[in-house]
Amino acid sequence: MRSRLKNIFQKFRFLRSLRVRLLVIIMLVGTLPCILMRYGIMQSYESRTVRQRTTAVQTQLKILANHLITYNYLQDNSSEVIGAELAMLSNLYDGRVLIIGGNFKVVKDTYDISQGKTIISEEVIRSFNGESLSNYDRVHGYIEMTVPITETVKIQTDNEETETTVVRGVMLTSISTDSIMSTMDSLGQRALILEALTIVVVISLAIVLSDILTRPFARVTQAINTVKAGYSNEKISVPDYLETVHIVDAFNQLLGRMKMLDDSREEFVANVSHELKTPLASMKVLADSLLTQPDAPLEMYKEFMGDITVEIDRENQIITDLLALVKMDKKAAALNITAVNMNDLTELVLKRLRPIARKRDVEMVFESIRPVTAEVDEVKMTLIISNLVENAIKYNKEHGLVKVVLDADHQMFSLEVSDTGIGIPEDALEHIYERFYRVDKSHSREVGGTGLGLAITRSAVLMHRGSITVKSLENEGSTFIVKIPLTYIAG
């Protein structure tokens, strides 16, 4: 079933095209008004013509009604004048006229079918009450009208003479609307021809306009494909529409980001190559020195082998840090979130690092503002605290101070690590999280490290949906502030 639906969607995939949608919209906008206008005109013509025909016939029926009273036709229907008028009216409108007397009997039927019969209907009764009625039956093609035959009678009451209108009979008339329908058919055919011509013009215009309107998007696609194929890496420009400008701007920003990532990757590869080659070069020099001196004393062998061991450890540390960073970048290392007592964890990390601090005669102070329990990955939080505190120790001055402050509000906890060390130049602050970046390369070589610590720290913080900021003054010290949500926010 799913595959069948997929096949159906594939067949009608063209409907998702902007060109097709524009074509359909323009066609609808162009043709619907024509259809509605034709329908409206025909309806208006029909209602107006029927109304005029009804008014004209009713007027003649009222005149005929007066003649009927004048010639006393209801009592004696032998008048040739009235007969001629009735025949003329019937022939003129292709209709039928029935004259009904006061006893509801048909006095005259121009079709000579119902003469002498009794007709009682709602229309006739209402007409005997003085109403003139009309009804248009479109299905059967006729207009039915009832007109009262009235006579003005003078009545003498209390020495006063008053006039009143008395209904003596009713004229029931049915006239054909064939001529109206014939005219409407003729008009309808002409309207259809005009409508068809209009639709042809609209479709042609829609095809041309849809092609013109979508042409800038085609140019955007072509430009992007050119960049994708590798023929060009220059920024593209299609300023025809505001929408194409937005699309092009977004693509150019993406292109710039890709270039930056490409440059960063090349620089990273170069740095990795350099960092990995340096220990190897040192080991090769030491090994070559031993090989060129076959009678070298044992003490020299021990010293050189010790140096080779240090370089191997350094190489191993670089590779370990690189693997950790790559895993974080690719999100391969899933976070193992648990509720962690941050006060105990921080004290434990500081306890491990105190021997390093004592060697460099650096004092460490931990200030806990309040108890903090947070949903974090304990291993990665240990890595964050260790890297920041270890850097604060390594890049500190003699008899310096490292202060760690732990605090929290109702949403986030903060870890502040400050030192009284050499500080970071202002122009280097934006680069310190880059891989292998070192502010002072000579001092960095002296204190050790791979140049990946802050990059790893920042990646671990971002994995927790947190932030890391730094404040530093050269020769006065640095302060790193990490803020992480107390409750883990899943990505």
Image: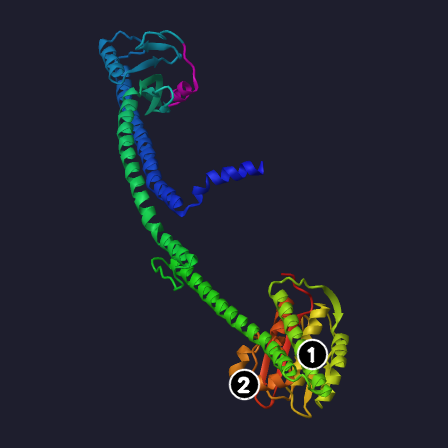
Relative depth, front residue between 286 and 340: 286
Kind of residue sitting beneath label 2 = Pro
Q: Residue at x 29, y 11 (%)?
A: 73
Q: Residue 114: name its quadrant.
A: top left
Packing grade of label 2 (10 A; few <14, some 14-19, many >=20) is few
- Secondary structure found at label 2: loop
Residue 477: percent from left, percent from top: 61, 87
- Asked if the residue at tag 1 contacts the one at tag 2, i.e. Cβ–Cβ closer than 8 Å, the answer is no
Q: Residue 94: name its quadrant.
A: top left
Left or right position of 304 against 141: right
- Secondary structure found at label 1: helix
Q: Residue at x 70, y 82 (%)?
A: 306
Residue 140 visible, this angle:
yes
Residue 228: percent from left, percent from top: 43, 57
Give the spatial CA distance, label 2 vs label 1: 34 Å
Q: Residue at x 38, y 10 (%)?
A: 105
Kind of residue sitting beneath label 1 = Thr
Per the rendering, the mark at residue 425 is 2
Residue 186: percent from left, percent from top: 26, 25
Packing grade of label 1 (10 A; few <14, some 14-19, many >=20) is few
Magenta region: 118-130
Left or right position of 353 against 80: right
Residue on which disc 1 sits: 309
Q: Is residue 122 in the magenta section?
A: yes
Q: How many marks?
A: 2
Position of 240 relative to 480 (above/below) = above
